[in-house]
Image (cartoon, rainbow, N blue to C red):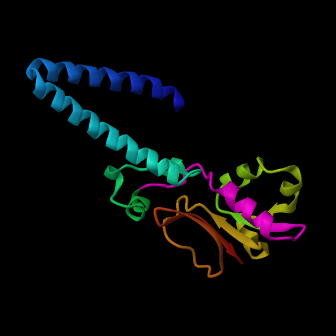
Amino acid sequence: MLFIYPPIVILSLEGLIYLSKSIKIKFKGLSYRVINIIFILIIASSLIHTAQFMIRYHPHQNVYFNILAGKNMKEVKNSFELDYWGLSYRQALEYILKNDKDKVIKIYVTNACGWYNSLILPSDDRKRLVYVKRDSLDEAKYFISNYRWHKDEYPYEDEYFSIKIGGTKIMVVYRL
């Protein structure tokens, strides 16, 4: 999807230039400058808000939604997938591997992202992880989910690890 950013940036800049020229033609002198400054401040405040979100929630800045999606992340979660790509699985797997000293750790992940994220782990860590299927869930020591296709909480009680963005969980690990 990154290929689409350059045309969007070019179109946005062209639009800003056109708008600036239109304001300059319509308003002369001091009022033109005041309107331009106000316009620049509005755009800058929007960019600052987005940058603050991205810095605050790094490495999960991909979960950003603007105010049009909902007033808070809990509301957004009801309408959209939050961690669609499952990038938070890496942190969950690293946490389990760091804190569980068993040589073999049986885990259940709710979608393929959990398995794909293990590929970035060191080989020795990957060898410790054993993935179980849904019909063998009772064999798993941990249940891991990024809430993809599942907006509600899970029925398990022993929450071992979670990642929250804006007060809303995007990743949860339960000890079974």
Q: Is residue 37 magenta?
A: no
Q: Which residues are magenta?
A: 80-106
91 within the magenta span: yes
Residue 82 point in image, percent of width and height: 50, 55
The quarter of the displayed image where residue 103 is located: bottom right
Quadrant in the rendering for residue 90: bottom right
Residue sitting farthest toward the bottom: 157
Left-right relation of 128 to 80 = right
Horizontal relation, residue 138 to residue 5: left or right = right
In this picture, is 149 found above or below 139? above
Viewport quadrant of the C terminus: bottom right
Whether residue 149 is visible, yes or no, is yes
130 w.r.t. 11: above or below:
below
Please tell me which residue is depicted at 86% across the width and 61% down the height of the picture.
128
Among the 4 quarters of the image, the one containing residue 41: top left
Q: Position of residue 71 (x, y in %)?
A: 33, 59
Q: Judge by depth and name the residue closer to the eye, 18 or 160.
A: 18
Using the image as rendered, state which of residue 160 and residue 18 is in the foreground: 18
Q: Is residue 112 visible?
A: no
> Please, which residue is most extreme toward the front here?
30
Relative height, residue 81 to residue 150 (above, below)? above
User: Number of numbered discs present?
Assistant: 0
Q: Position of residue 47 (x, y in %)?
A: 38, 41
Q: Decide if residue 105 is on the left or right side of residue 162.
A: right
Residue 126 at x, y = what percent?
84, 55
Q: Name the residue: 62% across, 51% down.
A: 87
* Nearer to us in this view, 81 or 63: 63
Q: Residue at x 59, y 50 (%)?
A: 59
